[in-house]
Amino acid sequence: MKKSRGRTGRKRRRKHLQSFMDGVNCSHKLEYIKLKKWLKDRGFEDSNLRPAQFWGTGRGLMTTKALQAGDLIISLPEKCLLTTSTVLRSCLGEYIMKWRPPVSPLIALCTFLIAERHAGEKSLWKPYLDVLPKTYTCPVCLEHDVVSLLPEPLRKKAQEQRTMVRELYMSSKAFFSSLQPLFAENTGTIFNYSALEWAWCTINTRTIYMKHSQRECFSLEPDVYALAPYLDLLNHRPTVQVKAAFNEQTRSYEIWTNSQCKKYEEVFICYGPHDNQRLLLEYGFVAVDNPHSSVYVSSDTLLRYFPPLDKQRNAKLSILKDHDFLENLTFGWDGPSWRLLTALKLLSLGADEFTCWRRTLLGDVISARNEQQTLNITAKICHFLIEETQHVLLQISRLKRSKENLKKHLALVEALRLEDLKILQKSAEILCNLNMATA
């Protein structure tokens, strides 16, 4: 017997597809049941948000009622938040208090997470620890083969991030050793680099901003972190607007929406107006069609279309560097940025125009020749970056077939590069139209 092709069959298929797109409710899973009970014991009551698995964003929170602008999304009591106060109240507190030089608030939180995860069933925070990611996709966690495929400016920042976490680990080893009386097992085994990397990523990707008063037992680094169980399941969407802050009256961290959300849809918040390179660096993901995204132009790429024998080349570079015009040069959805065009205009100045460099930085038109040459070189740079991006996408495609263990990380870099390609192709179209208009 053939499958139903009538109206009822179509409705059923449409309903099934829609439920998949909306998200699969996960609130029946044991780890979420335990987490909700744990939160309830700490005063959290919520009947509108459900953990769910979504197509495209993965794990997130679904609303069981339609949300209007001005509605409260979530109110998480202070007792549910994990802060440096939590750490100081634990058995780690006395060791932190007497350690000199003082540890940073970040290291205090990292130490607590590692110690609690090691405690297993004995940890009071186990229901929360059980729903935290076991692995992360921040650049610090990526293999060298994957990092090498990142765009140049991000690749450099990824290497700096890796160095910073490594140095954080090395500088904290003596403090970790001082905790030996608390553990039967060797602290070197518990507080290893892998454990610190996991804890650092947990704090870097999942904390909310919450300012705390300065304490003498901590270093002078800002104490602005708070881990917020359940609330941290909310995913980012760049176009969403929310208001988030700790409410001193209710002693709760609250998020209010300025956007609408339909019943059974995923509820989003906004982590800030970040481009995709920043999102990947700080949070380990990429947002599709991100309006804040840009493709960065390195100084090496900037200079490849200018004659090295230009007598004023070094002077021009010195001016650009002194006026901070060698960083944050970008292509966006609306074409080349003003900063990029200004830098290229200055580099395109003829020998007889060089004295006008100050006017160039202010945005003045120097000559028709300078304007046309700037557009031509901008278009060349754009096409060079398109070819480079396509070449990297081809490399990623080959690696995905040969390196199964890197597939997840390669897919992430691929998503970033595909977004870059869309931006560059849009910029090339804009530049083509500009060239036609000035021809």
Image (spheres, rainbow, N blue to C red):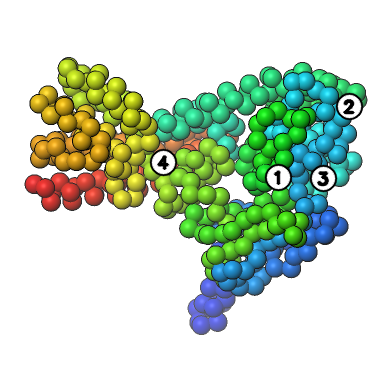
Quarter of the image that includes the N terminus: bottom right
Instruction: Report the disc number at residue 226.
Output: 1
The residue identified by callout 4 is 417
**For residue 297, which quarter of the picture?**
top left
**For residue 330, which quarter of the picture?**
top left
- Separation of residues labelled 2 and 4 (CA atoms): 46 Å
* Mark in the foreground, 3 or 4: 3
Judged left or right of residue 115, residue 303 is left
Give amino acid for label 4.
Arg
| Residue 221, x across and y down, in percent | 65, 31
The residue identified by callout 3 is 125
| Residue 376, x across and y down, in percent | 17, 38
Give amino acid for label 1.
Ala
Between discs 1 and 2, the one toward the N terminus: 2
Residue, x 76% and y 45% (percent of image)? 82
Category of crowding for the residue at label 3, using alpha-carbon neighbours closer than 10 angstroms: few (below 14), some (14–19), many (at least 20)? some
- Separation of residues labelled 3 and 4 (CA atoms): 38 Å
Cβ atoms under marks 3 and 2 closer than 8 Å: no
Give amino acid for label 2.
Phe
